[in-house]
Amino acid sequence: MQAVNEGDRWMLRLEPGEEILDALGRFAQDHRLRAAAIGMGIGQFRSATLGYWNGQEYETHEVAEPTELISLAGSIAEADGRPSVHLHASVGLRTHATVSGHVLRAIVGLLAEVRVDAFPTRVFSRPMDESLGLRTLRLEPDAPELRARPPGGPSAR
């Protein structure tokens, strides 16, 4: 992976054969990112497994052929002390049809170009929401000083 940054924005180039969730997780670990948005991704996947949440579980769709990565978006948070990468993608097939969903696995083909916007003073968490059966993004840390803040008060910095 190649990576350059300007301030809190990063541009990444993932290489052929990299699994995108693993690569972004390693990137977050190496750069101590505990809160980030993935706002753009293009390139090619060699293969991918995308999911659709039906309210109880992911219904998976295997894409076993090379695809154009049309759009990639998501977030990086912390779960159980490690980076948690959540991605959604739209990919284009050879027939020009598109397939979209939650990225469960994706292997980079020729390359993937990904923009990561970090929030260096924040920690996003991804606790399990038992009522949904999913980990959900929590933007504010679960700190006593935030719970005690009156409604409508200034936001934490």
Image (tube, rainbow, N blue to C red):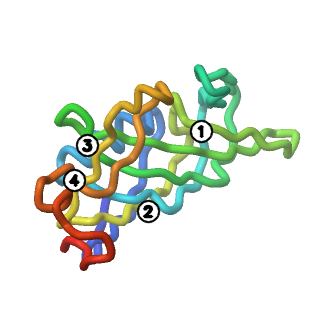
Asked if 154 appears above or below 88 in the picture, the reply is below
Label 1 – label 2 distance at C-alpha: 17 Å
- x, y (%) of residue 86? 44, 42
* Badge 1 vs badge 3, beta-carbon distance below 8 Å: no
Query: Would you say 15 lies left or right of 66 here?
Result: left
Query: What is the secondary structure assignment of the residue under circle 1?
Result: strand
Mark on residue 115?
A: 2
Q: Amino acid at mark 4?
A: Pro
Task: Say which of marks 3 and 4 sits in front.
Answer: 4
Q: Which residue is mark 1?
A: 45
Badge 3 vs badge 4, beta-carbon distance below 8 Å: no
Q: Residue furthest front?
A: 150
Q: Position of residue 140 (x, y in %)?
A: 27, 57
Which residue is labeled 4 in the image? 141
From the viewer's perspective, is the residue at label 1 or at label 2 nearer? 2
Q: Residues within 10 Å of mark 1 (few under 14, many from 20)?
A: many
Give the residue drawn at x 24%, y 79%: 154
C-alpha distance separating marks 2 and 4: 24 Å
Q: Amino acid at mark 2?
A: Arg
Secondary structure under badge 3?
strand
Q: Nearer the viewer, mark 4 or mark 1?
A: 4
- For the residue pair 61 and 154, the one nearer the viewer reads as 154
Residue type at mark 3 is: Glu
Q: Where on the picture, by quarter, is residue 156?
A: bottom left
Residue type of the residue flagged with mark 1: Phe
Q: Is residue 54 left or right of residue 25?
A: right
Q: Which residue is mark 3?
A: 78
Q: Who comes first in sequence, dot 4 or dot 1?
A: 1
- From the top left corner, tell me how far across and down residue 97 is, in percent: 85, 42
User: Whole-percent x and y of residue 68?
Assistant: 68, 46
Q: Quadrant of residue 41?
A: bottom right
| Mark positioned earlier in the residue sequence (1 or 2) | 1
